[in-house]
Image (spheres, rainbow, N blue to C red):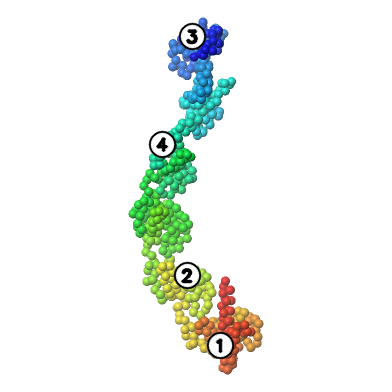
Amino acid sequence: MLTMEEALRQAGKPPFAAGNIVKGTIIEIGAKEALVDIGYKSEGVIPASEFEDLKAVKVGDQIDVLIEKLEDKEGMVVLSKEKAEFKQNWERILTICNEGGTIAGKVKAVVKGGLLVNIGVEAFLPSSHIDVVVSRNLAQYVGNTYQFKVVKINQERQNIVLSRRELIEQERAERRQKLLTEMTPGDIRKGTVKNLTDFGAFIDLNGIDGLLHITDMSWGRIGHPSEMLKVGQDIDVVVLDINRERERISLGLKQKLTNPWDTIEEKYPVGAKVKGRVVSLVPYGAFVEVEPGVEGLVHITEFSWTKRVARPSDMLKTDQEIEAVVLGINREEQKISLGLRQLEANPWDQAQEKYPAGTRVKGKIRNLTSYGAFIELEEGIDGMIHVSDMSWTRKINHPSEMVKKGDEVEAVVLEVDKANQRIAVGMKQLAADPWEGIDQIYKVGDLVTGNVTKLASFGAFVGLQHDIDGLVHISQISEERIDKIKNVLKVGQEITARVIKIDRSDRRIGLSIKAANYSTEQLKAEQAILDALKPGEDLVALQHAFDAADEAKQEESQ
């Protein structure tokens, strides 16, 4: 409708003039055009391309047309339906823009940077304003009709920029506020998986996003949310918490199901056998799923009574179905302790009956340590021979002095410690202790023969019969002063010496080479001299010589 100002301005103009919009009546329809009568002396032609569907038009229909020329070369009026619509729509759109309104339009084609939309005139829709998520397939929108918001208009160039995204965002904001007002913890809502992350999934609740944390997806173990969900999937979730100020919603999936840990003690009492699937192997054991949401740990120490398991993968593999025994339950911490070895009898239960103290055993040396050797009595059960139980007479600093790995040896069971799963055995107990009858073997004054086994700065050790060592102090080698013992004695050299001291408590025998040819009186005099010597004098007493020998051996073994 014309305003009063426009009516006054056009009052002096003839009704038929170039640029005017007039009513026309279709009087004839051809294959490619329609003949229109505007009440002028001649008719005008509208090409079929200016109609959405020329077949839908019929004779007698009235349409608005714009007069481009009153007369062409053939004397006909030049008319345009499209330009009439454009002029009318342009004015209408200017009004909408000024009011900040919306307009409906049909997507006409894909162009560079976005879409071309027909809203009565052609308008441009940038790809970033098509939807809240940028789409790579713009062709899917062609031919569809949507509501748009006019965001920019250039009157000089007569072009318009539209946005569909702003309307969607506005609508979502309204829905979000409504949902935040209506929603309460405990509600079950339908949603769509929008995005997956390492820590959970974002769920679109038709207007607002909520976070479904990975720990709230299942009562069981989940490595990644993709194990349960996929983008675009529709799911029902439980509202756990709402922060209306920050517009954050926490969601849960497992809360729709009963917590299996609530009745765990009744379902899996201690001592019960359970079947499950190995879901994870770690250095300290294996996690076994006994039902969805319930896992138990088989610690590596509970794999076998006898086998030494270095890695859980030596016995089990992921996804393997196994049977185990429930050892303990902690419902608060949601932990179940399982055992594999409890499926079989504990061989240590029979160890005391099978290996009572005093039993002679035989086996191979499996391993050496600084304090002893381990002998394998049977598969998985070892006996330990301490260095102190290897010889009655020799001081053993390291087990390698007596045995080596792989040697087959005999021993005697000394003690069975079932609680700590240890069996103590000894080698020296195979024979009688020679020191028990030392008085019948050696007496002070006896003349003995032996071979030098070791040299030290203070003297020489001599191997005697019955596997007993004697010590010749440097002062007892010769009547002459000796500075270095290696100048007069060598390892392996056979010597003859006199027994001049026997110490039963410390299991030591003192020898003297220089006293080998002494008379009884001389021997007694030498004995008296040795007994009278005190620490710090030129000649140390035999007791201190033995102590020095022990210290030297310890230093060498370290």
Q: Is residue 468 visible?
A: no
Q: Is residue 61 above or below residue 93?
A: above
Distance Cα–Cα, label 1 vs label 3: 154 Å
Q: Is residue 452 above or below residue 161?
A: below
At which x and y percent is residue 383?
45, 70
Q: Quadrant of residue 265?
A: bottom left
Distance Cα–Cα, label 4 vs label 1: 107 Å
Q: Is residue 148 visible?
A: yes
- Residue shown at the point (46%, 12%) measured from the top left: 62
Label 3: which residue? 37
Q: Is residue 292 above or below residue 249?
A: below
Type of residue at label 3?
Asp
Mark drawn on residue 500 = 1
Label 4: which residue? 182
| Mark toward the start of the polypeptide (1 vs 3) | 3
Type of residue at label 4?
Glu
